Image (cartoon, grey):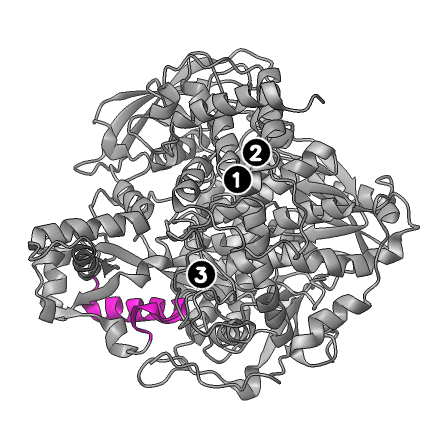
Amino acid sequence: MSTANGLNLTLKVWRQKNDKVKGQMETYQVSDISPDSSFLEMMDILNEKLINDGGDPVAFDHDCREGICGSCSMYINGEAHGPGREITTCQLHMREFKNGETIYIEPWRAKAFPVIKDLVVDRGAFDRIMAAGGFVSVNTSGNTQDANAIPIPKADADKAFDAATCIGCGACVASCKNSSAMLFVSAKVSQFALLPQGKVEAKERVLNMVQQMDDEGFGNCSNTGACEVECPKGISLDNIARMNREYMSASFTADKK
Amino acid sequence: MTKLDSKIPEGPIQDKWTNYKNHIKLVNPANKRAIDVIVVGTGLAGGSAAASLAELGYNVKAFCYQDSPRRAHSIAAQGGINAAKNYQGDGDSTYRLFYDTVKGGDYRSREANVYRLAEVSANIIDQCVAQGVPFARDYGGLLDNRSFGGVQVSRTFYAKGQTGQQLLLGCYSAMSRQIGKGKIKMYNRHEMLDIVKVDGKARGIIARNLVTGEIERHSAHAVVIASGGYGNVFFLSTNAMGSNVSAGWKVHKKGAFFANPCYTQIHPTCIPQHGDQQSKLTLMSESLRNDGRIWVPKKKEDAEAIRAGKLKPTQIAEEDRDYYLERRYPSFGNLVPRDVASRAAKERCDAGYGVGTNETGEAVYLDFSSAIMRYGKEQANIQHIHNASETKIRELGVDVIEKKYGNLFQMYEKITADDPYKTPMKIYPAVHYTMGGVWVDYNLMTTIEGCYAIGEANFSDHGANRLGASALMQGLADGYFVLPYTIGDYLANDIRTGEISTDLPEFVAAEKEVTDRIDFFINNKGTKSVDYFHKRLGKVMWNKVGMARNAKGLTEAIAEIKEIREEFWKEVKVPGSADSMNPELEKAGRVADFLELGELFARDALLREESCGGHYREEYSTEEGEAMRDDEHFTHVSAWEYKGEPADAVLHKEPLNYENIELKTRSYK
C-alpha cells in the first residue's frame, strides 16, 4: 500500500554490536513514510520491519521525543541531529527529506563518547564533569533565605536561563573537529557565574570542571563555532568566552588547593 | 474491614506537620552513615529525595533507566510550579492553595497531605533559587508569576516554557554534588525489575544493567519508588517513550496496594494525532490558556469545510466562532481546570464541530489573535506610538507573545509546519498525567514496610484531577521536604541492623523470578512485536477507558485487555539476546505490566459509579453534561490488593474525611 506523498528512502545505518568489535554501515530500505512523521518514528518503522523479518533492530537513544531530554543523538547526513537548526533528532520531520533520498545515520563520534551499541554512545563524561563542580553547594533545609531576598537584574537572569537551557545531548562535541566539550561546560559555568548564588564558588567551579573536561579526553576549542550552529538549544559561543575569562581570572586568583 | 491506616497526625490541620516533625524519631549523623537507601527514578521526586537523603548522610543508591539522571521526564514539564508565596499580593495563602488543590481534585484527595503540600510549597521556591535555578524575573529583579487553570490568583513560578527542565537540572546539580562526594552511587541505564522483601520489610531490589544485561542484587534498609506515572498504558501519551509502571507494579505485586488507577488526567492542549505511524503526543503548555482563546466554528458547515481543507480558520468571522469555554464557564473561561476543558473539547468534536484535518477530525482552535492585538495596543501606548497602524500593533503584539511563549510556538511550528502567529493552533486532549498510583500513608510509606512511593508514582495529593503546575510542586515537596523527615522516623529502628546481605534466600528467589521471565521472552517463538500489543492495548484504553467511560464499554475493555494479555504471552516476539543492550526486551517487560494494570484500571473505573475529576462516567452526569459526584457512596480512596489475576484484586476503601473544607459541587461557571 502506498499513499500519494509517502516517502521511499534508502538508509545507511551504522551497526556495531558493542564497544569491543568493529562496526560498519548497513543499507536498509523503508517505504511509504509519512512526511508528517518524525525522524525517530521513521526509525521505529525500520525497527518494526527488522523485527518482523527476523533481524536485529537498530539501537538508538531516545525518550521524551519533544526535544528536551537530550537523549537522541544521531549524526544524520553529516550533521548532528540532521538538517535544520535548533532542533533535536526527535524534532526533525520527514518532510525535510525528498522521496528516493539516501540518508546516512551515524552515532556521535568522539573519543570521550565510546559507542555502546549501534547509534548509542556513552555520555557519562558529561555527568562526571557535572559532579566535578556543576552545582551550588546548598543543602536542602527549608531555611534558605526568601527567594526574593536578592533581586537579580532581569538581563542577568535571562542570560543565565539561556545558558541553562543546555540539554546535554553532546551535539557540540560531535560537531566539533576537535571533539571539544567547551560549549557544554561553559553553559553550566556561565549559568552560575551570572547568578549571585553561584558567585561564591565560581573560581573552584570553573577550575574543577575544566580539569575534569580535560581528563575525559575532550579536545580543545579553536573557535570554529560549529557547536553553536548545531546546538539544538542555540547556546551561544559567548558562553565559551565567559568561561575563558572566568578560567583565566580563577587561575591567577584562586586560593591554592 | 480495612487494613489501611493513613496515619494522619492529630490536631488542627495547620499544626499537623509541625507537630509531627517535632515528635518523630531522628537518626544521628554517625548512624546515618550505616544506613542505605535505594531510590528508583531520578525525576523531580527521586532526584530531590536522593540528593536530600545523601546530604543528610545516608548512603544512597539511585537508579534510572536513562543514560543520565538529567533525562528523567520531569524535564519536559513546561508551564510552571505553584507556591503560596503571595508575591503578587492577590490574596494567596497556604489555605487558598490547599483549598484550590482539594477543590481542583474534586474532593477525592486526603486533606492532611494536601495541606502539608501547600505548606511546604514556598520553601521549594526558596530552595530552588538558592540552587541557582533561573526563574523568570521582572524588571525589578524579583520573581515573576503567571496564572494556571482552576485558580483565581497568580502563584505559578516559571522559567519560560522550560520550568520542568530548570527544576530537574537543579535536582541533578544537587545530585551531582553528592555523586562527586560518593554519597550517591548512581546506577544509570539500570532498570528495577523487582523488589526484595526480607521479613516483610523492603530490603532491596533486583535490577538489570541495560548495557550488559547483567542481573544485579542491591540491598538497602529502605526502598523509595519515584518512577513516575503510567500514562503510557494508553500507548499514545505525552509521557516519554520509556515511562512505565513497572517499578510501581512490581511493588504492587509484592504487597503494596495500588490506589485509584482510573484517575487519569487528559490534558486539553496537545498537538492532535497526525496518523497511525505516530509514536507519542506533544503537549502545549497550559500557560498558553492565559492568552489563547479556544474556539470551534458555530456552524457545522464551516467545520466540515475546514476539515475538507476548503476553508481557513482566519476566514471565519468573529460572530461565527463559538468560544465554548467562555460561553459555558464565564467566570473561569479559558482557564477552567484540565478535566473540564478536555471534556468540553470532546463534546464539541463529537457533536461534529471538530476542525482536525486528520482522519478523526478531532481538534479545536487555540487562538492568539486577540491577545496579539491587546498586547500590541498596550505596547503602542508604552512606546508612545500614537495612531499606530493595525500592522504595527500586530507587530508589537507578536513581539510580546514571542517573549512569553516563543519556544512553545516554535515547537508547534516544527511539528505541524503551521505558523501559530498567523493561524490558530490546533489542539486536542491527550493522556498526560496519572493521579492514581501506589497507595501511601501520611509518611509516604506503601503497605510494604520500608517501601516508599513519592511524586507521580504515588496517589496522594491530587485526588481525581490535578491542577496545572502542581505536579512539579508535589514531586519536589515529597523529595526535598517530606520524605527526608518521614523516612528517618522509620530508619531510626535500623541503626543496629548493619548491611543487608544480598546472599539471603529472598534475593536469590527474586533474582530467579526475574531471570525466568527474561528467558521466557528471549526464547518465546512468537510472531508479533511488543509494539503490536502495546498499540492494541492503547486503542482499547483510549476508546473505552478514556475521556468518557460507561459500564458497557468498561466491561468490554476488561475482557478485551485480558484477551490481548493472553495473546501477548503466546505470541510476543523479542529479538536479540538477554546479555546485551536490548531495547525490545526492556519494552516487553514494561508492556507485560501495562497489560495487567490496564485491566485493573478498567475495573476501578467500572466500580466507581460516579463522575469525579478526570474520571467521567456518562451515566453519571447532569443534563448539561457536567460531572455528577456521589459523595455518599464514593468519598473514598479505592486501594487494590494484588491477588494474582487483575480480576481477583481485592478492593479496600480508605474513607476521606473533610474536616476543613466543605464538599461542594465543583463549579467554574
Numbered range of the magenta stretch:
B332-354
Looking at numbered disc 3 in the image, what kind of residue is underneath it? Thr
The answer to whether tags 2 and 3 share a subunit is: yes
Residue placed under numbered mark 2 in the picture: B67
Quadrant containing the N terminus of chain A in the rendered view: top left
Q: How far apart are marks 2 and 1 (CA)?
A: 7 Å
Quadrant containing the C terminus of chain A in the rendered view: top right
Q: Residue at x 59, y 18 (%)?
A: A252
Looking at numbered disc 1 in the image, what kind of residue is underneath it? Arg
Residue A183: image quadrant is top left
Q: Residue at x 44, y 32 (%)?
A: A72
Is the residue marked by circle 1 packed among few (<14), some (14-19), or many (20+) residues within 10 Å? Answer: many
The answer to whether tags 3 and 1 share a subunit is: yes
Between B17 and B318, the one lying in front of the other is B17
| Pointer 3 or 1: first along the chain | 1
Is B344 magenta? The answer is yes
Among all residues in the image, which is located at the extreme front?
A253
Residue B45 lies, with reference to residue B600, above or below; the image says above
**Secondary structure mostly seen in the magenta stretch:** helix
Residue placed under numbered mark 3 in the picture: B156
Residue placed under numbered mark 1 in the picture: B71
Marks 2,1: beta carbons within 8 A:
yes
Q: Residue B585, image x and y in percent?
A: 57, 37
Q: Is mark 3 on a helix, strand or loop?
A: strand
